[in-house]
Image (cartoon, grey):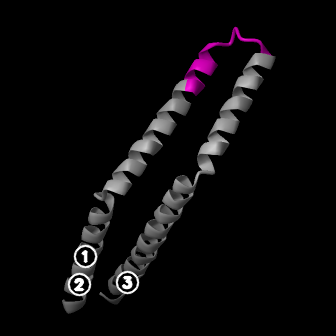
Amino acid sequence: SDSHAHTMQKKKNQDEKLYRELNTESYKKMIMRFEQVFNSNLSEFMTQLKSDSDSHAHTMQKKKNQDEKLYRELNTESYKKMIMRFEQVFNSNLSEFMTQLKSDSDSHAHT
């Protein structure tokens, strides 16, 4: 049917748009940075978890330092822009996805 072909073309266009977005240099850098921060925090977390011989006070200070470091990281302009962009792309695709889902369920209801 025309509706199905149109739906499939729209989906293909959305996929291509998302693919282009995901292949931009800024997106790749953002993901690499996210991975670095995540791995660094994961590594620190695992180290902290293993070193239960540390005193409670020392552990709490270390945790506080990590929290402050993370807070500073999360408050950088580039991070805020990255999150805003991620949110835009996500919301845009979520909205299209939900529309698609509704249209799919509507067309199934009519068959």
How crowded is the residue under tag 2: few (<14 C-alpha within 10 Å), some, or many (20+)? Answer: few
Nearer the camera: disc 1 or disc 2: 1
55 drawn magenta: yes
For mark 1, what is the residue?
A: 13
For mark 3, what is the residue?
A: 103
Residue 34, position as x, y percentages in the image: 46, 44
Return the residue nearer the eye: 14 or 79: 79
What type is the residue that disc 3 sits on? Ser
Tag shown at residue 53: none
Q: Is residue 89 left or right of residue 18?
A: right
Q: What is the C-alpha distance between the residues marked 1 and 2?
A: 14 Å
Q: What is the C-alpha distance between the residues marked 1 and 3?
A: 16 Å
Quadrant of the snapshot with the N terminus: bottom left
Label 1 or label 3, whichever comes before in sequence order: 1
Q: Is residue 24 left or right of residue 79?
A: left
Q: Residue at left 32%, top 64%?
A: 21
Label 2 or label 3, whichever comes before in sequence order: 2
Q: Residue at left 19%, top 84%?
A: 5
Pointer 1 with pointer 3, Cβ within 8 A = no
Magenta-drawn stretch, dominant element (helix, strand or loop): helix
Secondary structure beneath dot 1 equals: helix
Tell me: residue 1, above or below residue 83: below
Nearer the camera: disc 1 or disc 3: 1
Secondary structure beneath dot 3 equals: helix
Return the residue nearer the eye: 47 or 85: 85
Magenta region: which residues? 44-56
What type is the residue that disc 1 sits on? Asn
What type is the residue that disc 2 sits on? His
Rendered image quadrant of residue 62: top right
57 drawn magenta: no
Count of numbered tags:
3
For mark 2, what is the residue?
A: 4
